Image: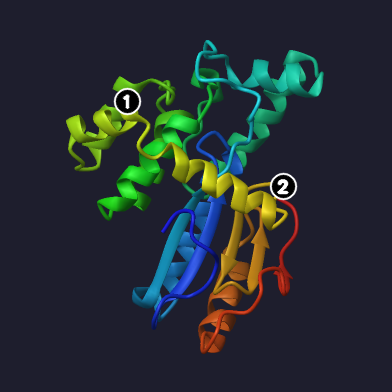
Amino acid sequence: MAGEAFGQAGDRLVVDVWSDVMCPFCYMGDTLLGQALEKFPHASGVEVRYHSFLLMPQLSDGDAPVNAAELLSVHHRLPLDQARAMNDQVAERARQIGLDYHFERTQAVSTRTAHQLSHFAATQGKQHEMIQRLFQAYFTDGLNVGDHQVLADLAADVGLDRDAALAALTSGEFADGVEADLEQARQYGISGVPFFVFAGKYAISGAQPVGAFLQALDTSWNETVGTPAAVGATSTGGGR
């Protein structure tokens, strides 16, 4: 579950994933891992757990939405046209694996509340469905994923109780869970996402090819016995 340590649970292979709703490579990484699992013969024995990470921690809940290209331009001190061109390149890479990015529609906001919704969905057994809907909402639909009403609608989209989701967000019931994930990332030295850890032993950073995920799945499946090894023992993959 979110906030817990790395490692396996029982006879399952656990994959822990740190990601953020507004991270384009996280959406790609999730998709590529899914494609790898479709080819993995033991996929039914794999549990994927999602953990919160803030790509832009400087954004606050009260901030007005800003377009992703404008945010990229300001954050990295780039000309706006260059930021847009960079996003176009990312969108093309996403298109090649079946994703539909529309950066011109994006509304960059603090994603803390969206992560709380992920935690709520986890308690209902629908965390992955919720994560995927949040990615789509941000990158394809151009929705404000910091708005409680929008988030409640998205919860309903994946079959969750809208009123219960809205109540959880309003009360901040899962805010501590989000903070626990962020603290855990700091403790393990995770500074960029997506970040995947297989059975608490093998790490992949970035949206790597399907083959890299398959290798990590196969190796960690064969070695998933006894006490989980320490985090960071082996790292697979590199940048995005």
Query: In the picture, which quadrant includes the N terminus?
Result: bottom left
> Looking at the image, which residue is at 46% across and 41% down?
176
Instruction: Give the residue type at disc 2.
Output: Ser
Q: Residues within 10 Å of mark 2 (few under 14, many from 20)?
A: few
In the rendered image, residue 235, in percent from the top left (x then y), is placed at 72, 69
Q: Is residue 47 above or below residue 85?
A: below
**Mark closest to the chain's N terminus, 1 or 2:** 1
In the rendered image, residue 168, in percent from the top left (x then y), is placed at 29, 34
Tell me how the rendering is colored.
rainbow
Check whether the beta carbons of the residues at disc 1 and disc 2 lie within 8 A of each other. Answer: no
Instruction: Give the residue type at disc 1.
Output: Thr
Q: Nearer the viewer, residue 134 or 96?
A: 134
> Looking at the image, which residue is at 58% across and 38% down?
23
- Count of picture labels: 2
> With 82 as the anchor, is 181 left or right in this view?
left
Q: Residues within 10 Å of mark 1 (few under 14, many from 20)?
A: few
Residue 191 numbered tag = 2
Regarding residue 194, the answer to whether it shows in the image is no
In the rendered image, residue 214, in percent from the top left (x then y), is placed at 55, 73
For mark 2, give the secondary structure.
Answer: loop
Task: Tell me the CA gap for discs 1 and 2.
Answer: 29 Å
> Looking at the image, which residue is at 64% across and 47% down?
193
Report the residue marked by disc 1. 170
In the rendered image, residue 65, in percent from the top left (x then y), is placed at 52, 14
Q: Quadrant of residue 231?
A: bottom right
Residue 227 numbered tag = none
Regarding residue 67, the answer to whether it shows in the image is yes
For mark 1, give the secondary structure.
Answer: helix
Nearer to us: label 1 or label 2: 1
> Looking at the image, which residue is at 66% across and 19% down?
71
Q: Is residue 176 above or below residue 144?
A: below
